[in-house]
Amino acid sequence: MSLVLPQRPEPDPQLRSTLVRALRDFLPPDAVLEAEEERRPYECDGLSAYRQLPMVVVLPRTVGEVRQVMRLCHSLGVPVVARGAGTGLSGGALPLADGVLLSLARFKSILDIDPVNRTARVQPGVRNLAISEAVAPHGLYYAPDPSSQIACTIGGNVAENSGGVHCLKYGLTVHNVLKIRLVTVEGEIIEVGADAPDAPGYDLLALLIGSEGMLGVVVEVTVRLLPLPERAQVVLAAFDDVEKAGTAVGEIIAAGIIPAGLEMMDGPAIQAAEDFVHAGYPTAARAILLCEVDGTNQEVSEHILQVRAVLERCGATEVRTAGDEAERLRFWQGRKSAFPAVGRISPDYYCMDGTIPRRHLPEVLRRTAELSAEYALPVANVFHAGDGNMHPLILFDANKPGELERAEALGGAILELCVEVGGTITGEHGVGIEKIGQMCVQFQPEELEQFRAVKRAFDPRELLNPGKGVPTPRRCSEYRALPDRHGHDHVHGHGEDPRP
């Protein structure tokens, strides 16, 4: 089934004229983009297969301007999609033809650094990596490090609950944010969380982080900082079998070691990364693991020896410890460059994002290879292996009729495999428009209704990023009625939602 974009009405010319005129009353001339060539750069996020021109783009500079935009859109019933750097991979920032695209790109100030309490207060347009660069003189850093950290913004990280290669030990965005300020759909300011380790009342902070811009517009974030470790060292292990590498992941954790990062790449990804950045990867390997441990000198020395012993016991054909900081960074550069590297070897690729229990990693790798053969599309696998977060890259050519649709179908099959083994359809990329169908597989109708109830509590008129994240009952009924690749009903064992 080809992904169906949210059905929206065509923009009303009179409403558009009224909206633009009102926006120009309080925003600078360069903050309202209405010409087609001005709006074109905002037509998609990192899921570039799906594009839609927004009705108008606004680029406010102050919280007051954001509030005015939201109040105006609320009064006119105009939907709003908030956007950060546009590096998201699930279509979460796909604009609406009848809506406003609200860019937070100009909110790029680090407002305060508190080295004593190890916190930083930043605007949502601050780049992820810029936080660590700014606090490095204090011996601190910000732990979540998505592969796109050189470009992605903290506001987008909050929206998607992003992770990164070091999330195994230090957690996702939700574990590293203390407080956020956001503007509601009505243009009011609310503050959630606290500067202290805990806040009274319901944990609304955890609810809002990962809500994909559907509940409010984040305008300020207070993040937790960590001290730079005394030492960090990475081990690279090569394997002649992908399943052996998958088994080694579980064995490392079972040994009582929690690595700072534990990443896996298969043969196609290894070759692409090596050709791109020359990281020193063994290109004959069927899979490699990168395992980083950090802490005190003594702790790292002990854990490196333990990790090496586990890897050798699990059948690694080569185990190599980075000899210095330059080599450590080079190993990680290859992993962090895997997505663009794969982009050099295929006209297009479709990046999936599912999470599975670690013990099922060998099985899922084997079955993913079977699905790849069934759909006749190559798959390059890149994993946050330590926490079971898979990123299969499906290679295809959108210029060949039917290949995009086949890539979508393969991606859906992989995600549903994740659910089958007890996992989830997303680890850090979010649902957006991409995984709407698989939400109907993962959750029962009663559960989805609770999600919709939360949405209504924050946004009764469904003006904030509508059509994303949570499917409608009708959408699920239609999806469940579709035949799967074996000709059976698409979803088994899930009761039909009787509402239209």
Image (cartoon, rainbow, N blue to C red):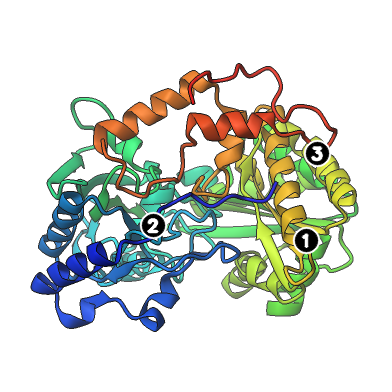
Q: In the image, what residue type sits under mark 3?
A: Pro
- In this view, 186 is above or below 229: above
Regarding mark 1 in the picture, which secondary structure is present there?
helix
* Residue 164 or residue 299, whichever sits in front: 164
Left/right of residue 425 with respect to residue 109 in the rendered view: right
Q: Please tell me which residue is depicted at 35% across the width and 61% down the height of the picture.
A: 11
On the question of residue 265 being in view, the answer is no
- The x and y percentages for residue 289 are 73, 54
Crowd class of label 1 (few under 14; some 14 to 19; many from 20; radius 10 Å): some
Residue 155: percent from left, percent from top: 33, 57
Q: Is residue 176 above or below residue 447?
A: below
Tally of numbered tags: 3
Vertical order, 12 against 451 (above or below)? below
**Badge nearest the viewer, 3 or 2:** 2
Q: Nearer the viewer, residue 106 or 334?
A: 106
User: If you read the primary sequence from the N terminus, does the residue marked by circle 1 or circle 2 appear first?
Assistant: 2
Closer to viewer: mark 1 or mark 3: 1
Q: Quadrant of residue 12?
A: bottom left
Disc 2 residue type (three-letter) = Gly
Q: Front-most of 146 and 105?
A: 105
Image side of residue 289 versus residue 129, left or right: right
Percent position (x, y) of residue 319?
79, 57
Which residue bears the numbered disc 3? 362
Tell me the crowding category of disc 2: few under 14, some 14 to 19, or many 20 or more residues within 10 angstroms, Cα based.
many
Cα separation, mark 1 vs mark 3, equals 27 Å
User: Residue 272 appears in which quarter of the rendering?
Assistant: bottom right
Say which residue label 1 marks. Answer: 403
Give the distance between the C-alpha atoms of the residues marked 3 and 2, in whole angstroms: 32 Å
The relative height of residue 98 versus residue 369 in the rendered view (above or below) is below
Q: Which residue is mark 2?
A: 156
Amino acid, disc 1: Glu
Q: Gap in Å between the C-alphas at discs 1 and 2? A: 30 Å
